[in-house]
Image: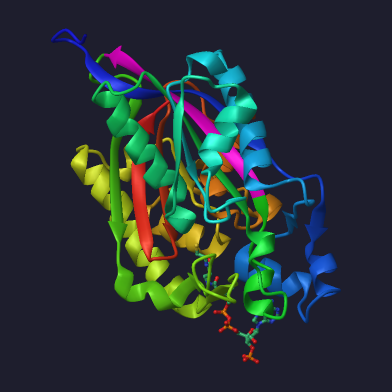
Amino acid sequence: MSDQSTIRRAVLTGTGAYLPAQIVTNAEMAARVDTSDEWITERTGIKQRHFSAPHETATFMGAAAGRAALEAAGLAPEALGAIIVGTSTPDNAFPATAVQIQRELGAKKAFGFDLAAACSGFIYALSVADAMLRTGQVESVLVIGSEVYSRILNFEDRGTCVLFGDGAGAVVLQARDVAPGGVGVLSTHLHSDGNLADILYVDGAIGRPGMPGHLVMNGREVFRHAVSLLTGAVTEALTANNLTAADIDFLVPHQANKRIIDGVGKKLGLPPERVIITVDQHANTSAASIPLALHTAITDGRIKPGALILLEALGGGLTWGSALLRV
Ligand code: COA
């Protein structure tokens, strides 16, 4: 129960990550398709990506990241209330990846479900978890982004196959009664525009006979929309909280492309040292990219307790959104 001087919030208590052992450099991609390290680096900032071995599925990687996040939070799997997995590349149509991870972790009393919002999957999952925690439905949620995009890439299309990689990231959120100026998720803002579906999509799935599905993208159009929609989403978060960009300690963006990230950072007037970049290390890992970046910056000591951080993402749908939280 909250008394009048406190407010119930979803508080970040742990992070975890998993990247497949196999690293594929830009030079190695150049041996596979007609591209070069120079082209990829200049256009995207990507230097390497991780590609999964057959056993490194969304469940396997998500469970590893989730286990690490629970350990960091000091929360026993048996005490966990719910698991939400943002993924577009599940092992099975069902059971959901989240339920398979529940089994792997021994999180006996947790319920779980997957959420499909492409590269915005983590922000969407965080938003749902935040609502469930604030309304008292659960006391703790493991939010995971886990993706194996190497399985949906068209390696005949150099314009897309060099941009993506595999991996998983996870956070634990726990309900806490905190002072209004204290830690926790302050806001989330979500958006979709199905009219822009044809600029970034997967051309099939289990429900479409004979079409397992490959990623298709009009990169130029995605780029054109990304900076303005993402700037809109972060401005919306700042306005809703009566803040300005100067109040933000770190921007932790979806790691798709360094040029998009730089564009948003510049529009906000944020110096580069306050923008977390990991896309060079793992390329675009879709729903996994924000928790991977967050985990990196928390474990290397850049993001310290009390920091105000702004998350943003855009992906197929189109879907996009932002989240503001104090860690
Ligand atoms: N290596 C070398 N050349 C490549 C290439 C590659 N991997 N991919 C495309 N090209 C070539 C094209 O064939 C084209 O050649 P042409 O001029 O002879 O026809 C040229 O590079 C320019 O292609 P274009 O697609 O216009 O490049 P671009 O400047 O728009 O950059 C992206 C391409 C994909 C890097 C850029 O559009 C982008 O970053 N978009 C956003 C993508 C993204 O982040 N999506 C995920 C959001 S969740």
155 left or right of 172 in image: right
The residue drawn where x is 56% and y is 48% is 289
Q: Quadrant of the N terminus?
A: top left
Q: Is residue 37 visible?
A: yes
Residue 68, quarter of the rendered image: top right
Depth check, front residue: 253 or 62: 62
Q: Residue 48: x and y, percent?
A: 74, 57
Residue at point 53% right, 15% down? 78
Name the residue located 34 percent from the left edge and 40 percent from the top edge.
Answer: 127
How far across and down, in percent of the image, does residue 248 sit? 37, 38
Q: Residue 21 in the image: x percent, y percent?
A: 81, 45
The secondary structure making up most of the magenta span is strand
Name the colouring of the figure. Answer: rainbow
Residue 6 part of the magenta-drawn span: no
> In the image, 315: left or right of 276?
left
Q: Looking at this view, is 319 or 302 the one in front?
A: 319
**Quarter of the view holding residue 239:** top left
In the picture, which quadrant includes the C terminus? top left
Q: Nearer the viewer, residue 142 or 254?
A: 142
- Residue 203 vs 320, above or below: the answer is below
Q: Residue furthest left?
A: 4
Q: Residue at x 65, y 57 (%)?
A: 283
| x then y, percent, for residue 259 | 53, 64
**Magenta-colored span:** 167-178
Residue 112, placed above or below residue 3: below
Q: Quadrant of ligand 1?
A: bottom right
